[in-house]
Amino acid sequence: MSNPAHQTADITQAVLGRLAEEPDPRFKQIITTVVKHAHAAIRELDLKPDEWMAAIQFLTKVGQTCDEKRQEFILLSDTLGISMLVVQLDQARRSQAALADKTATVKPTEATVQGPFYWEGAPVLPLGSDIGKGMPGEAAWYSGNVTDTHGKPIANCCLDVWSGDGEGVYDMQMGADAGMRLRARFHTDSEGRYHFWSIKPTYYPVPADGPVGDMLRAMGRHPNRPGHIHMMVYRDGYVPLTTHLFAEDSPYLDSDAVFGVRDSLVVHYERHAAGKAPDGRVMDKPFHTAQYHFVLAPA
Ligand code: BEZ
Ligand code: FE
């Protein structure tokens, strides 16, 4: 006869039972849900021991691929759509009041993934500066404004922008000694407006030479992200926004490797022949202009 004190027929219940004394309710809720779903998936799949071992070996490799510069677990989360799901839930929670406000005239700008190439402390530059000078890629003039959800301009709002170059390469990928490039912090003027020069970014692959790349290939997926420029838009009193603008004519808009594209973030880059630019500068090569209105929710 088995002793019911030592063994519970349902392993799931046995594991959950050991959490009975857990004092942190959120921790308890998270572990309970993870255990329930993991056990249910294994039952549904009738998972074989060699399949479970393959999963363990895969996760081991993911860990072994991480170092100070590379975070393969985040890449795994990104490419499985988990990062984007967490971003969406977070924005919905933090912007709840703004979304429910019947008097609001505009919705907060949609957030998307931060990605691994944010570098804190980008130079603070005056509006109109050119951060794309001498970089591979065609010049682009970015302009627009930042308002709240009632259309009120947000002055002195920081736009912390970064992107890869016109060949899809970020400064952080250029070796240990490479300094910052194609990144800066701008602040909106008294009417909430911003404008600066950079380049029109192109599509590029997420790192695909590790286990996540193997997983993408096994799934028959490509590793590419459509061309985009990143920005964090923030000012005290508002829910900070981390987002991108995507180039309307970029390949991979429909199949972003990290599921970050939102229709509302796709912008038209108007291509102009060499000549006079919006700031009066005379361009000796073709250039682009792109506009965007950012909207922040009150905190
Ligand atoms: C990026 O856009 O920089 C990025 C996002 C997720 C994974 C890799 C790169
Ligand atoms: Fe990026």
Image (tube, rainbow, N blue to C red):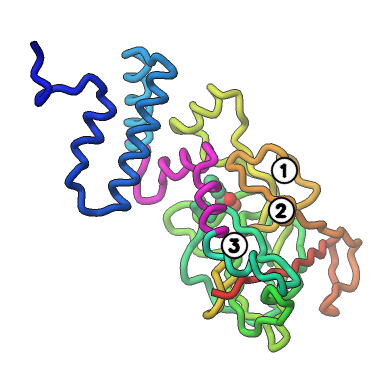
Q: Amino acid at mark 1?
A: Leu
Residue 246 numbered tag: 2
Asked which quadrant contains residue 63, the reply is top left
Q: Which class describes the residues within 10 Å of circle 3: few (<14), some (14-19), or many (20+)? A: many
Front of the two marks 3 and 2: 2
Q: Is residue 269 above or below residue 225?
A: below
Residue 228 left/right relative to 2: right
Front-most of residues 176 and 190 = 190
Residue 162 numbered tag: 3
Q: Residue at coordinates 22% horizontally, 19% vertically from top-left?
A: 9
Q: The magenta stretch spans which residues? A: 64-92
Residue 72 falls within the magenta-colored stretch: yes
Q: Residue at coordinates 58% horizontally, 74% vertically from top-left?
A: 185
Q: Which class describes the residues within 10 Å of circle 2: few (<14), some (14-19), or many (20+)? A: many
**Label 3: which secondary element:** strand
Asked which quadrant contains residue 125, the reply is bottom right
Q: Which residue is mark 1?
A: 253
Are dots 1 and 3 in contact, CB under 8 Å?
Answer: no
Q: Is mark 1 within 8 Å of ligand 1?
A: no
Give the mark, 1 or 2, whose residue is nearer the N terminus.
Answer: 2
Whole-Å distance between the Cαs marked 1 and 2? 8 Å
Are dots 1 and 2 in contact, CB under 8 Å?
Answer: yes
Q: What secondary structure is the magenta-colored segment mainly?
A: helix
Front of the two marks 1 and 3: 1
Count the labels in the image. Answer: 3
Give the mark, 3 or 2, whose residue is nearer the N terminus.
Answer: 3
Quarter of the image that includes the N terminus: top left
